[in-house]
Amino acid sequence: MSNSQTESDLTTIPKSLPILPLRNTLAYPTMVLPLAVGIPRSIQLVEEAVRGDRLIGLVGMEDPSIEEPTADQVWSVGTVARIHRVVRAQGEAMQVIVQGLERFKVLRWLEPNPYLRSEIDVLPDKIEPGVETDALLRSLKELAKEVVSLSPHLPDEVNRFLTQVEDPRHLVYLITVNARIAKRDGQRILETASLKEKIRILIRHLSREKEILTLEQKIQTEAHEEMDKAQREFFLRQQLKAIRKELGDEEEAGEVAEDYRAKIEASGMPEEARKETLRELKRLEGMPPQAAEYSLIKTYIDWMVDLPWVRSSHDQLDIERARRVLDEDHYDLSDVKSRILEYLAVRKLIIERTERSNRAAGKQKAGRSGSGAADGSGSGAAKKTAGGKTAGKTAGSATGKTAGRKPGKTKAATKTASANRAARRPPEPEVEPESSDEKRIPTEDVLGVFAELPGDEVSDHELSEEMSGLLDPDAFDDEEDFFDSPFDSPFEEEPADASPKSTPADPEPSKPETDPNPDGPELRAGTILCFVGPPGVGKTSLGKSIARALGRKFTRMSLGGMRDEAEIRGHRRTYVGALPGRIIQGIKRAGTRNPVFMLDEVDKLGSDWRGDPASALLEVLDPAQNHSFRDHYLDVDFDLSDVIFVATANSLYAIPEPLRDRMEIIQIEGYTDHDKVTIARRYLVPRQVRANGLRPGEVDFSEEALRKIIHDYTRESGVRELERQI
């Protein structure tokens, strides 16, 4: 539109106009705009304007949800438009084609009914010709063309229009209409009088839009490339499958590869092992079965998918069951059995206390979320400090302990909570009240004190005495007594009517609510037991009994005469006939990642120019390292931290010092004649009767005959030769 046309239009614009609010769009000068009109008062406005000079005022509004806005709900700057065409739609709605002429500003609202009408002031755009304006227009055109080429919703014809438009004002409004500009930003451009300032606003907006579109295109390109790559790989695999089918190799290369890929995904191996196995599988797919390396790669993948990366046995930490298993499998050895039971009890205690701590931490977090309603409401509840120790107990305390009764037996809430357990356990007789000077201290609390006092060392004898209470099933009333609250003091117990204690002026630093590593050293750093004794006293069978008591798999490796380090760590795949070490082989043979692993004859390890197996065992038996044991053949980390290692030896002093430092030595002495006779009657004779195809009762050994065999035909500390003679 030329300047002469603009001046002509200005002379025809009246001082007051009917105002039509626009809900979802804006109108700009020189631009043609289709409008859908359906509100009765807007329809009346259009009809009266068509009968008159066809001029109306179009203004935008902030909230498009308002159907009939008032004067204060629309913007004050809009566009004078001429109605070119009106098309009646179904019903009373109509389609109106308008063209913007000039900007205007509302000076005064005249009347709200039957439609909005206002007195206006026309606002012509300020066009400032010059070099700066030409430079801005050129930059705007180039930037707009780039945005159009990147925008999928804009047709290519827009670039042609941009090239043909010479009127700078029309160019600015054309770009504004086609660009993705928010309604408020578009209103800002409409309200700006200077053309150069309009161009600057558009350049800033289009620059940002260009960056967004470029990034979108990059993302879409990468996505398409991935899809194209997957499709291309699929087509190539289909072609390769067809070729191999013609050659008769389809089953060997195609189906086998897919089967391996499914096994890799189902094995649950870590990401490092998964990547390495998939890399070898890709090499396998590109090789003919006749290649020399084909079988080597296939063997490696077989090992990787067959290892129990995630398969494990569930521990049966029942101390009474473990006691029965040990008594069934072995006679006497009471000291050894007690130490094994203590070992299992410690594992049970650690696991269960850790679980209780985690549950208590979860309850604390849940309690804090509702602390606004609970703070101060329970004056009779026990108050606990941040360190987890009791600050005071009142008559309403949940512990309900008194000096005259067992803990957990003095309040109805505890009886209700124990109702289900009472159905499973016969009632226990009432115990005479203890004196106030002799209060029984739960064993777990004693151990808790040992654990909470850094620097205090407890001897094996002291620990054994404390653990003996844990192994006695009659030592505690119920689970509440056994696992008392971790926040209760282990040595203090107040009567129910005691007043709350005052909080210390300088309390201890608060402990963390949860263990930062709940599955860390406490659960992983288990003791390595080593049974030392003469041959035939039952060292290896004790390891089998531990596995049976825990419900774990048992595997055994003999170290006698071993001199090559590769027996432990495996051979690298560059060697002919390479295989994993005996540790990984034992894990695979067990079928679970947490078996009981017996290291037999650890005192008979040797060393020569091929390496020192004892040094290789240091990593296996060190809890700080065995979570990432790297076998030379696998060349990836394997977690051995859940394996229970048990060693045996005949001589304590023949065990290398670094290995002996990592193990707890349990001495097993030889049997007396009376012990040998009892073992022969209970275990050896019945076993040999079955082994020789006889039935019970067909042959019997008197005690005198057994003693004769022991004295005249055997000379040993164990019973191995005695069984052979029987």
Image (cartoon, helix red, strand yellow):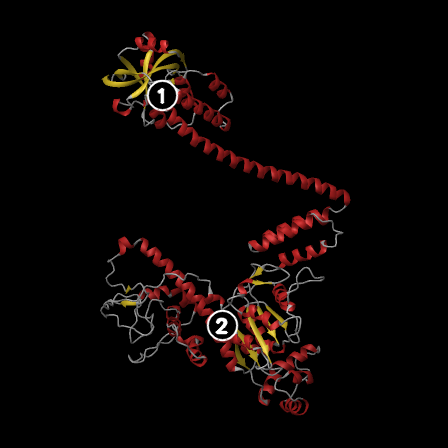
One can see residue 706 in this view: yes
Q: Nearer the viewer, residue 491 or 694?
A: 491
Q: Residue furthest front?
A: 131
Q: Position of residue 150 (x, y in %)?
A: 50, 29
Lateral position of residue 287 relative to residue 18, left or right:
right
The quadrant holding residue 583 is: bottom right
Q: Position of residue 434 (x, y in %)?
A: 31, 79
Residue 441 versus residue 37 in the image, above or below: below
Q: Which of the two marks, 1 or 2, is nearer to us in this view? A: 1
Q: In the image, what residue type sits under mark 2?
A: Leu
Q: Nearer the viewer, residue 345 or 319?
A: 345
* Image quarter in which the N terminus is found: top left
The quadrant holding residue 94 is: top left
* Secondary structure state at the residue bearing disc 1: helix
Q: Disc 2 marks which residue?
A: 344
Lateral position of residue 286 relative to residue 377, left or right:
right
Q: In the image, what residue type sits under mark 1?
A: Leu
